[in-house]
Amino acid sequence: MLQTSVLEGDRLALARLLTEIEADSEAGRSALNDLFKHTGNAHLIGVTGAPGTGKSSLVNQLALHYRKPPNGEAPRSVAIVAVDPSSPFTGGAVLGDRIRMRELSGDAGVFIRSMATRGSLGGLATATIGIVQALDAAGFEIIFVETVGAGQSEVEIAKLAHTTLVVDVPGLGDDVQAIKAGILEIADVLVLNKADRPGVEAAERALRGMLKLGHPTKRAFNHHGRPTVTESSDAELAVGDEWIPPIRRTMATDGKGIVELAAAIAGHKAHMEKTGGWQLRERARLQGEVEDLLSSELMSRWRSGLDDKDFQKILDQLVTRSISPGQAVTKLLKENSQ
Amino acid sequence: MAEKKIRVLVAKPGLDGHDRGAKVIARALRDAGMEVIYTGLRQTPEMIAEAALQEDVDAVGLSILSGAHMALVPRVMELLRANGQDKVKVFLGGIIPDEDVITLQKLGVTGIYGPGSPTQKIIDDIRNSVAALA
Ligand SMILES: Nc1nc2c(ncn2[C@@H]2O[C@H](COP(=O)(O)OP(=O)(O)OP(=O)(O)O)[C@@H](O)[C@H]2O)c(=O)[nH]1
Ligand SMILES: [Mg+2]
């Protein structure tokens, strides 16, 4: 069985299992059932941001860092899942994230897998959760999930990851600020990559400004029994139980700022563990997972018990506006349960 | 259940300059509905075999214009086999002399394509050879 070999560290078995999981095959499902008890040890790090911001280059640098920590810490094994969109027209995809990760090759402590979204709506492949579980069970201590930030996918990645990095670059312009405001909400750490480019200062100021909107740093403190209001000058301070996303400048092409970025990631993990946020996220993550599985299972069961003629009849009524979609659902559920 | 997707690694081993041809092929395979893992320039046979394994590909496409195919291709084949990936189909594009074509085919290379080969032929060959395995 693939799952046994995966637990023994067989890389080809792992690669094949990932294919089964992607195909949502019986073998893949049953392996995931067996492997689940071996999961829960990895630190899952989501990396998202607009196309070309340097996500793959950053993951490459961070992985190099974890493989050879400069401060004498023990190296940690790293898995990388790089998700790219499938073409909606042909279903094909060019998955090019490995181009930036050539320095990681030849290291048995690293495993890189590219995957296409295969028509999943969110931009994050449906199978990503299963893939991550398999890599977790296989013993990888750090698991990166890289995904292009486009609409829904970053929300999904935030649900999947313990720590989410949102990557921005100078000079993307003000027109994308509206999108950024949404994406900022899911950031645990903000990375301002391509810091060698002009406009870093302005970009950082803009990010800080938006962070303040999302996370007002004015906090009431009961200091010596007397309520005072302090304005935190450093937006990076975690005040009480709240984590204020730090901003880290990087140059992913040569690795500048990576040590500081890794420290911010470690800081987020430590904060989550201290405040109980880690357990909360874990719980929410698993709840989301079960709900997703449940809804697709219920949907397919409902469909298999459905008489297509009845369905078409109801659709006819819907098209002629003699019933509403809400009434259609009521009817369908009734008919199906008979 | 999702259909079985064909996954192909497209790599440019050796030290020669540009990867325009490899990119054209990568896009053509994508447009044919395949998932193409594109690894870029200057790949060693070790890098190619490692990526083929991690990505669990059905086929590997190599683009070699440097003339070093007799050094690179047998090594890639050897590493794929050593990794247990003997079923992975290998395709080669480049300017390959006839006698080398015969040697490489004997080694197990599935398809060899000179400049100007119709991409549809390459697509069909990959599809047929992968389907023959299933
Ligand atoms: N000047 C500069 N260029 C960078 C930096 N980081 C990455 N790049 C370049 O930006 C380009 C895109 O980098 P990638 O790492 O592929 O970016 P990505 O976000 O993974 O791209 P997609 O996956 O296609 O969305 C490459 O040409 C990199 O060399 C940086 O810090 N400074
Ligand atoms: Mg990338």
Image (cartoon, rainbow, N blue to C red):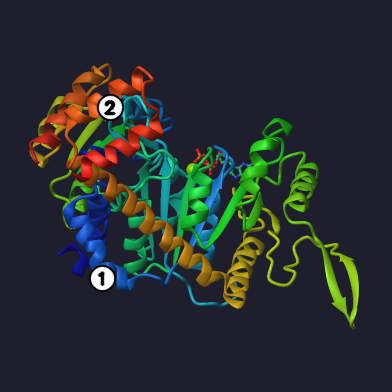
Q: Quadrant of residue A134?
A: bottom left
Q: Is residue A170 left or right of residue A18?
A: right
Q: Return the x and y of residue A256 as percentages of the image width and height.
A: 66, 55
Q: Amino acid at mark 1?
A: Leu
Separation of residues labelled 2 and 1 (CA atoms): 50 Å
Q: Secondary structure at mark 1?
A: helix
Measured from the top left, where is residue A84 in percent x and y?
42, 40
Nearer the observer, B12 or A152: A152
Left or right for B110, reference A146? left
Report the residue marked by disc 2: A314
Tell me where residue A123 sits by quadrant: top left
The residue under the point 13% across, 46% down is B87
In the rendered structure, which disc, 2 or 1, sits on the residue that comes first in sequence? 1
Q: Amino acid at mark 2?
A: Ile
User: Which residue is outermost to the bottom?
Assistant: A224
In the depicted structure, whether residue A89 falls above or below residue A136? above
Q: Position of residue B114 (x, y in %)?
A: 23, 22
Instruction: Identify the subunit bearing mark 1.
Output: A
User: Is residue A158 something that shows in the picture?
Assistant: yes
Residue A7 numbered tag: 1
- Residue drawn at (54%, 37%) of the image: A51
